[in-house]
Image (spheres, helix red, strand yellow):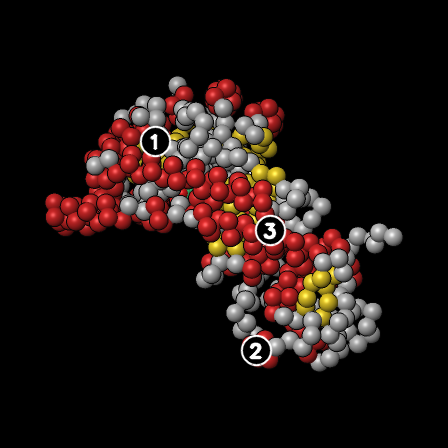
């Protein structure tokens, strides 16, 4: 194409339109005007990227989009070609730039934001979505919730619909105390603060403990919501590498000898995104380090109870003798994310400050939701749900492992999670990255979370996170098949066209 003197690509590098959309426009125009006739072989993505001085992902995405539109075809072993006449339907829909597969035109050009924008495409109808962090809607105890709300309204009337005290509905705080004591956490109801989900709990702790420009450490990779909070609160974030047992204490200690983070954030059980579980000896090591350097530990326990295999381990807060751990969690992943009920367990040293932050944020979490949740805990709905959900999650995990072996590209590796919702996959390093395959995968009807968004330092290009828990077995099977197919389609361009021919 570029050898063709008539082909000109004038890219506006500072404009609003993403580079890959501009490239699509140019190539499409060349095809429609006959400058690039059917059968023309396109340059390899790497070559074109080099010649235009743009990122390879822009070229890969442009090719993927044009393939989905019918302008290009990929032939295994030969490369990517201009297809025969694009259909009228395609041509018509592009003339006004409203192709149903077109990603949002405002896709920004910074890699991180582009990737997040791409992940928004996962919500398109018909896409089997493994990208989200939510538990499956078919787990939601809707009938129990209905009964609880009716009871609360009959019993409490308007009191259920006015402001609640900031710390939370007192009977719910007591119920949370009893609930966490079954996990080994010793506290009184005075140490329980009800939050708008775990997310708000994390945000409140960061607000209470950190000023702008201060530093927190996390695992690397870590929960994306934590990265978002750090960015919006203008707090620096440094990720400590993890291994199969979670955050590496040696690296943590090395780091904090020279840097003074205000908080250590960890998600020690069924870590998001890797599924790792920190063993007991490492939990103790982490607490020893935190105590030695007097750095509070923010423990995120939101997946703790989603265990379908392996031994249960105490949360860090259950091992905490000094009050160094602030525990945040919620009833979101086990029951009902939309009720937005979470909690913080904190000793008195931080509690008052946290209450002030909560008051400033939203006065209180919704009274009706708190009361309904309290009733469901009292009625044993949570325990019943957990047992059933974990049994089903194990079944889905097994289906996902079998489907991964069958359909993911050869050379892929993945964890075997014993709990939580996610399969953390490493795609073959010699092949396309997760971001490069993404648009093709969505066109083929399956979406995953692109692994690099979970890293604090832009690593993880070949990682994907798949929420197997969110889909039924038949969809898991079909979705993994689509992802494997998408990878092969992109790898055609990637591998075959760019390796020198074997003579
Ligand atoms: C590790 C982790 N913490 C917190 C949250 C937020 O949970 P919630 O819905 O309770 O706010 C999530 C959600 O994905 C998560 O994965």
**Label 3 element class:** helix
Q: Which residue is mark 1?
A: 345
Left or right of 21: which side holds 479? left
299 versus 467 height, above or below: above
Left or right of 281: which side holds 388? left
- Label located before the other in sequence (2 or 1): 2
Q: Which mark is residue 89?
A: 2
Q: Quadrant of the N terminus?
A: bottom right
Mark 2 and mark 3 in contact? Answer it, CB < 8 Å: no
**Label 2 element class:** helix
Disc 2: residue Cβ within 8 A of ligand 1's nearest atom: no
Q: Nearer the viewer, mark 1 or mark 3?
A: 3
Give me the residue at 77% from left, 67% from top.
41
**Label 1 element class:** strand
Foreground of the two, 434 or 219: 434
Give me the residue at 59% from left, 33% from top.
241
Residue 245 placement (x, y as % from top left): 54, 28
Foreground of the two, 351 or 96: 96
200 versus 494 height, above or below: above
Disc 2 packing (10 Å; few <14; some 14–19; many ≥20): few
Q: Which mark is residue 484?
A: 3
Q: Is residue 113 visible?
A: no
Left or right of 280: which side holds 496? right
Disc 1 packing (10 Å; few <14; some 14–19; many ≥20): many
């Amino acid at each position: 194409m570029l050898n063709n003197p008539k082909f000109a690509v004038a890219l506006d590098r500072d404009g609003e339109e993403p580079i890959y959309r501009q490239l699509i426009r140019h190539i499409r125009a060349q095809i429609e005007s006959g400058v690039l006739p059917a059968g023309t072989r396109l340059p390899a993505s790497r070559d074109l990227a080099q010649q235009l001085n743009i990122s390879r992902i822009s070229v890969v995405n442009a090719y993927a989009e044009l393939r989905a539109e019918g302008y290009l075809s990929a032939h295994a072993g030969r490369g990517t070609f201009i297809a025969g006449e694009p259909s009228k339907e395609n041509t018509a829909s592009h003339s006004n730039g409203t192709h149903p597969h077109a990603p949002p035109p405002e896709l920004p050009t910074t890699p991180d934001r582009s990737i997040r924008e791409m992940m928004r495409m996962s919500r398109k109808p018909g896409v089997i979505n493994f990208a989200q962090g939510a538990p499956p809607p078919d787990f939601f105890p809707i009938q129990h919730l209905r009964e609880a709300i009716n009871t609360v309204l009959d019993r409490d009337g308007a009191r259920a619909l006015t402001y609640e005290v900031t710390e939370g509905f007192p009977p719910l705080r007591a119920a949370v105390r009893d609930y966490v004591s079954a996990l080994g956490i010793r506290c009184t109801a005075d140490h329980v603060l009800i939050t708008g989900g775990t997310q708000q709990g994390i945000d409140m702790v960061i607000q209470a403990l950190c000023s702008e420009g201060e530093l927190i450490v996390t695992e690397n990779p870590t929960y994306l919501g934590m990265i978002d909070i750090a960015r919006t609160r203008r707090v620096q974030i440094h990720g400590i590498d993890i291994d199969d047992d979670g955050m590496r204490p040696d690296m943590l200690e090395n780091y904090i000898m020279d840097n003074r983070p205000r908080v250590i954030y960890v998600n020690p059980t069924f870590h998001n995104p890797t599924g790792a579980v920190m063993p007991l000896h490492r939990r103790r090591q982490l607490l020893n380090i935190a105590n030695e350097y007097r750095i509070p530990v923010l423990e995120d326990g939101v997946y703790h109870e989603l265990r379908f295999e392996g031994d249960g381990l105490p949360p860090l807060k259950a091992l905490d003798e000094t009050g160094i751990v602030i525990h945040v969690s919620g009833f979101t992943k086990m029951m009902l994310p939309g009720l937005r009920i979470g909690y913080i367990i904190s000793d008195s040293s931080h509690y008052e400050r946290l209450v002030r932050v909560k008051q400033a944020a939203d006065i209180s979490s919704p009274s009706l939701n708190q009361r309904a949740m309290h009733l469901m805990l009292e009625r044993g709905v949570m325990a019943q749900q957990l047992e059933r959900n974990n049994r089903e999650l194990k079944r889905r995990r097994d289906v996902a492992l079998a489907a991964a072996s069958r359909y993911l590209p050869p050379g892929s590796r993945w964890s075997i999670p014993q709990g939580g919702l996610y399969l953390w996959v490493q795609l073959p390093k010699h092949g396309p990255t997760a971001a490069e395959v993404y648009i093709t995968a969505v066109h083929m009807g399956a979406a995953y979370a692109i692994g690099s968004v979970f890293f604090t330092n832009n690593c993880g290009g070949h990682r994907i996170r798949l929420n197997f828990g969110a889909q039924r077995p038949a969809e898991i099977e079909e979705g993994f098949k689509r992802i494997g197919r998408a990878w092969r389609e992109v790898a055609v361009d990637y591998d075959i066209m760019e390796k020198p021919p074997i003579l």
